[in-house]
Image: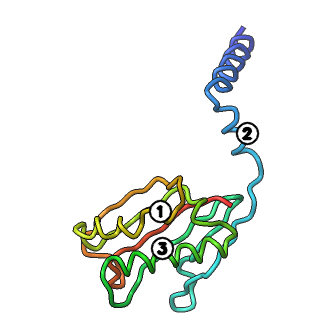
């Protein structure tokens, strides 16, 4: 009796999971994953610290890019976006394939200036974006830092 009830419950869960799309998610998770590729590894005292970008399957994760020279928020934003684009191209992607961008501002008052340079840089279908002002500022005296996730 217990085995029959368990079997019925399993079939019921499987049918509900299939309707909810959970079967596909479970199937994807069960498939073997491609090996992670890393690019531009940054070392600290001869120990790997982080990678400039990482590729897994058809996704590319680009580490935060900042601009550490003189200039206003517009100069910094333009240079950061150029660096993101270089990293994406190296990994076989492009700005048009970016899914998510995180923007970290040294000062929230730079939001408008950053937006003026940012707009249109990702094509006609821009990615989702989170923008925050960072308490204590962005590391390395950059006025803005950005990272992103894209597909190939």
- Locate the N terminus by quadrant: top right
Which of the 4 quarters of the picture holds residue 21? top right
Q: Secondary structure at mark 3?
A: helix
Residue identifier under label 1: 120
The image's colour scheme reads rainbow
- The Cα atoms of the two marked residues, 1 and 3, are separated by 11 Å
Where, by quadrant of the figure, is residue 99 drawn? bottom right
Q: Residues within 10 Å of mark 2 (few under 14, many from 20)?
A: few
Q: Is residue 34 left or right of residue 148?
A: right
Residue 58, percent from left and from top: 70, 58
Q: In the rendered structure, which disc, 3 or 2, sits on the residue that comes first in sequence?
A: 2
x then y, percent, for residue 104: 36, 68
**Residue drawn at (40%, 75%) of the image:** 77
Q: CA distance from mark 3 to mark 2?
A: 36 Å
Dot in front, 3 or 2: 3
Mark 1 and mark 3 residues within 8 Å of each other at the beta carbon: no
Relative depth, front residue between 57 and 113: 113
Name the disc covering residue 81, or none.
3
Q: Earlier in the sequence, mark 1 or mark 3?
A: 3
Few, some or many C-alpha atoms within 10 Å of disc 1 (few <14, some 14-19, many ≥20)? Answer: few
Left or right for 116, reference 126: left
Q: Is residue 124 above or below residue 139?
A: above
Judged from the image, the secondary structure of the residue bearing numbered disc 2 is: helix
**Label 2, on which residue?**
27
Foreground disc of the pair 1, 3: 1
Q: Which mark is residue 56?
A: none
Residue lying at the far left in this picture: please name it.
109
Nearer the N terminus, badge 1 or badge 2?
Answer: 2
Q: Residue at x 67, y 71 (%)?
A: 91
């Amino acid at each position: 009796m217990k085995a029959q009830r368990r079997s019925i419950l399993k079939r019921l869960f499987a049918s509900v999971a299939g309707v909810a799309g959970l079967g596909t998610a479970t199937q994807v998770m069960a498939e073997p994953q491609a090996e992670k590729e890393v690019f531009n590894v940054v070392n600290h005292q001869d120990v790997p610290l982080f990678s400039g970008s990482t590729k897994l399957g058809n996704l590319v994760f680009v580490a935060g890019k900042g601009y550490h020279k003189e200039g206003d928020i517009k100069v910094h934003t333009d240079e950061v976006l150029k660096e993101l684009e270089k990293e994406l191209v190296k990994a076989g992607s492009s700005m048009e394939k970016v899914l998510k961008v995180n923007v970290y501002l040294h000062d929230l008052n730079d939001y408008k200036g950053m937006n003026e340079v940012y707009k249109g840089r990702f094509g006609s279908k821009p990615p989702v974006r989170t923008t925050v002002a960072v308490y204590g500022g962005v590391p390395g005296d950059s006025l803005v830092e950005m990272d992103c996730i894209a597909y190939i």
